[in-house]
Amino acid sequence: MTPGFFTPRYFPHRLHGQHALLEEALADELAQPAPDERVLARIKKRKLQVKDRIRALEAREQTGGLHA
């Protein structure tokens, strides 16, 4: 593992990437002739989890805390 791999700044950037991929997955599913509501719900739930984690990490970074 490289030094700094788990720094507070790393996680929000990685999570933003995950959020973008989930947004693409949501758009792809919505583009289907008959989108699967269960798939949509799972993607939306995961997007919300990722977004909440981003907010928590960014808030912690602003306050200077490093522990969850």
Image: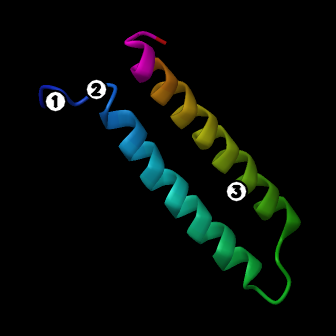
**CB within 8 Å, label 1 to label 2:** yes
- Residue drawn at the location 60% of the way across and 64% of the way down: 23
The boundaries of the magenta stretch are: 61-67
1 or 3: tag closer to the N-terminus: 1
Q: As shown in the figure, which amino acid type bears the numbered disc 3?
A: Ile
Residue that label 3 marks = 43
Q: As shown in the figure, which amino acid type bears the numbered disc 1?
A: Met
Query: How far, Cα to Cα, is label 1 from label 3?
Result: 30 Å
Residue that label 1 marks = 1
Query: How far, Cα to Cα, is label 1 from label 2?
Result: 9 Å
Q: Residue 28 is drawn in which quadrant?
A: bottom right
Q: Residues within 10 Å of mark 2 (few under 14, many from 20)?
A: few
Q: Is 20 inside the magenta-drawn segment?
A: no
- Residue drawn at the location 84% of the way across and 60% of the way down: 38
Residue that extends furthest to the front in the rendered view of this protein: 62
1 or 2: tag closer to the N-terminus: 1
The percent coordinates of residue 52 (x first, y second) are: 63, 34
Which numbered marker is on residue 6? 2
